[in-house]
Image: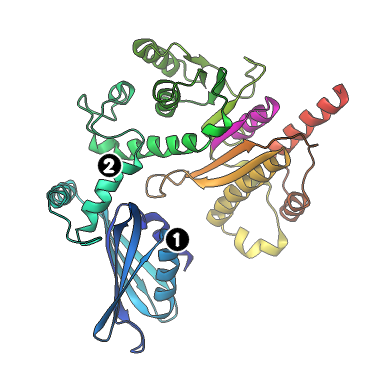
Amino acid sequence: MEQLRYMLDEIINGDLMTMTLSGARTSSGPSKVKIRPVMVKDQMKFQASEYVDTKVLHTNNDPNVMEEKILGWMEKDFKQLQAQTRKLDVTVLVSKKGKVTIKKKTKTQDMLKTRDKEGAADLKTPQKADGDRDPFSLVAAHNREKRYILKEGSPVDFLVDLGVMTKDGKVVRSRYDKFRQINRFLEFVQDILPALDKGRTVHIIDFGCGKSYLTFAMYYYLKILHGYDIEVTGLDLKKDVIDHCNALARRYGYDRLRFLHGDIASYEGCDSVDMVVTLHACDTATDYALYKAVAWNARVILSVPCCQHELNRQITCDLMAPVLQFGLLKERMAALVTDGLRGELLKCAGYKTQILEFIDMEHTPKNILIRGVKESGKRPFALSKDYLSCKQLLGVEPTLEKLLAAHFLNNREEG
């Protein structure tokens, strides 16, 4: 059922319109279940309507609870699941032996326009009772009014120049995924505001900033919207991109935002940093960025890793040979192990660490974000027993461990 779980992770969100579970395996349970998003006291829930004999039983569930219920129903009670989201039509078939077959069909632009018009019309319809209106209109309103930090309809200069918005603030349809990604990133920034000192200048470095959608968004959110005294540096290897971003920063009057040409491993442009951001730094470049953040004693780390090849080349484990013999599975497992060990190493270095979903798998498979917030008080760096057991089992030597061990060893010798 893991394949089904991944699919549900993708669609149990604000884009889901309807879902139906049918093809009951027995006569003792519900004959079908219908699921839709509803708003309950300004919170998005998922309403399950179970059809049992002549009765219909309704329950409102949080997304994670709804997902587990669906998995249970499809494992024991139903053969088929059909779902509609804003962008997809999904059909799931589960055989008697538990084989899961998933088919997805992407909706055409004409279908999306029709759905959008229907949703807009429903927004004008008076609400009879909580959850009675079309679920798409409810969730669409929730998305526009509640979920997005940068709201559609309010033009932002850098989003217009970067092609995400039109001049009147309308999100360009083909860039809507980028608009959602930017807002999702700002939610992570919003969460760590208590860790940033508003009484002094906050130094932020964005390693591998690229076209800098998120760098500009972070500056706009912290400096323009919230009045933080910040200095932001974006670093990237592409000189033409750096020149373009500097020109945009000058045009907007973002005088505390600059972009430099250079790589992560050799950057020595400062002695201390409050926040380090690294998005899609390839392979061990992420390790060097995390190492720099720890060495600077950064208060906050936000990292979206990419292309985790190092451990894929190293990993060996006789106990897991039946899994590791398949290249695709080994690659995916190595990527997860890489980021899991990175998270554990940050904990060993004194950071409260979380592994979070950055953006829906529908948009990019590179959807893991490592967030570290420095914990108060000092403690010696020491590798945990769990970390040592895991690396021994898998036969790996992560770059981040070597960098951190050398750093803390040098600090002890100098002390």
**How many residues crowd around disc 1 within 10 Å: few (fewer than 14), some, or many (20 or more)?**
few
Q: Amino acid at mark 2?
A: Arg
**Vertical placement of 166 versus 400: above or below?**
above
Residue at which label 2 appears? 144
The range drawn in magenta is 286-303
Q: Percent from the top left, x then y, of residue 93?
A: 34, 72
Sequence-wise first label, 2 or 1: 1
**Along the viewing direction, whichever of 64 and 146 lies nearer the viewer:** 146
Look at the numbered disc 1 and give the secondary structure of its residue.
Answer: helix
Please identify the quarter of the rendering in which residue 78 is found: bottom left
Q: Is residue 301 left or right of residue 26?
A: right
Look at the numbered disc 2 and give the secondary structure of its residue.
Answer: helix
Judge whether residue 234 is colored magenta.
Answer: no
**Along the viewing direction, whichever of 217 and 291 lies nearer the viewer:** 217
Q: Is residue 272 left or right of residue 6?
A: right
The image quadrant where one finds the C terminus is top right
Q: Percent from the top left, x then y, of residue 69?
A: 42, 70
Q: Is residue 86 left or right of residue 250?
A: left
Q: Percent from the top left, x then y, of residue 101?
A: 37, 68
Residue at which label 1 appears? 64
Residue lying farthest to the bottom in this orientation: 27
Judge whether residue 287 is colored magenta.
Answer: yes
